Image (cartoon, helix red, strand yellow):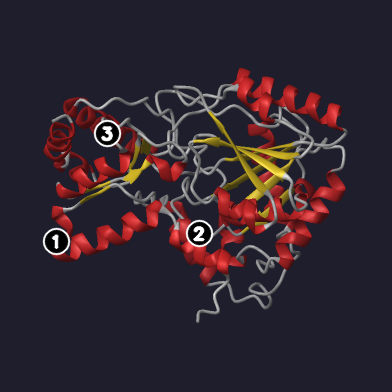
Amino acid sequence: MSGVAKKMRGFAENSSWIRKMFEEGAKMKAEFGADKVFDFSIGNPDVPPPAKFYTVLRELAQNEQPGIHGYMPNAGYPFVREALAKRLGAEQQVNLGAGDILMTCGAAGGLNVIFKALLDPGDEVIILSPFFVEYHFYIDNHGGVAKIVATDKDFNLDLGAIEQALSEKTKIVLINSPNNPTGQIYSAESMQQLGKMLDAAGGRFNTSIYLVSDEPYRNIVFDGHQVPPLMTATTNAILASSYSKELSLPGERIGYLAVHPAMADKEAVVGALTLANRILGFVNAPALMQRAVTQLQDVSVDNTIYARRLEAFCKVLDEAGMSYVRPKGAFYLFPQTPIDDVEFCRLLAEQKILAVPGRGFGLPGHIRLAFCVDEKVIAGSVEGFKKAMALAEK
């Protein structure tokens, strides 16, 4: 009899659709050859890191100063947090200092730190569908309850629906902009309205409701769009992000949290976040990567590569007759499916195209397509999409 926890067995049985499609892709590539499979299932950035990253990494690797690979304060090196505070302060239009920043093991690690620090058992976290598939697990890790609220037909904030979902149990409203899987960016006006709504609700319920924004795609935007600052919306704001996408370093697990400098209970919140970072076992973000990103605040990946791929993929979907909302950021398309999304993914798989069903993101009737792949893969998929659509419409 298995000694694995019942909850984990249940999680495994209903595990991520992304991982399932990734595994299916590996089988197909082994059977047919990688060049014959059009895999859009996983958001693993393939654009190379900026050239400056390799220069910085070589310089750091040659530094043999004693202690540079040892422990540091759990929140991260002060000089790293100071450099990041300077950049984020300008971006967020507030005066951030090193004490407002916490270095983390990626944005995912950062979100777990936030939930550990803020949630009591039964506290609710509002998440907006469609959502990143792991949010449910992160919230459950720390005794919270995920409460799903739909966005509107174009994946924008539905402020009325969010307001109806608020209660005395609400502790966090979690947003993700640019959004995975839709690429939507929430407008500055809607963010301001959301912040005021949460502050008013917190007053009614005699509590603090935190607005947490998961923003690893902030610097991957298209068509002149910009991501509005989080911290002008409410002082109960916490930003979680990473260098996984903007520097193409997902495997290096380097991210950060930023807490609004005027948050009423900031000292207690930052203290709880720092303790959570330690006792969850992260201890501190990787020392080498902390020192590296300090020197990379002014660079990012070549965004024009993703912009070209977006144009190419939109043409493919247009030719196939698929309906979609054009993404403003990130590197995903989330088109509607003419039939059940799982069944449509099966039809695509017959054409050696791998996509992820929308139900994995909380919104059936769509599929997620990651365009962090070579343009040849996108171009080669056009006939397969056409055939799958034709089969679906029979």
Judging from the image, what secondary structure is the residue with disc 3 in?
Answer: loop
| Residue 391 vs residue 24, the one in the foreground | 391
Q: Mark 1 vs mark 3: which is more N-terminal? A: 1
| Residue 74 vs residue 303, the one in the foreground | 74
How packed mark 1 is, by other alpha carbons closer than 10 Å (few <14, some 14-19, many 20 or more), is few
Q: Mark 1 vs mark 2: which is more N-terminal? A: 1
Residue 242 x %, y %: 56, 49
Judging from the image, what secondary structure is the residue with disc 2 in?
Answer: helix
Q: Closer to the observer: label 1 or label 3?
A: 3
Q: Residue at x 52, y 50 (%)?
A: 243
Badge 3 amino acid? Ile
Which residue in the protein does label 1 denote? Answer: 33
Q: CA distance from mark 3 to mark 2?
A: 50 Å
Which residue in the protein does label 3 denote? Answer: 339
Q: Residue at x 56, y 68 (%)?
A: 6
Residue 384 x %, y %: 14, 40
Q: Closer to the observer: label 3 or label 2?
A: 3
Asked whether, in this view, residue 12 is left or right of residue 311, the answer is: right
Badge 1 amino acid? Gly
Which residue in the protein does label 2 denote? Answer: 56
Quadrant location of residue 166?
top right
How packed mark 2 is, by other alpha carbons closer than 10 Å (few <14, some 14-19, many 20 or more), is some
Q: Mark 3 vs mark 2: which is more N-terminal? A: 2
Badge 2 amino acid? Val
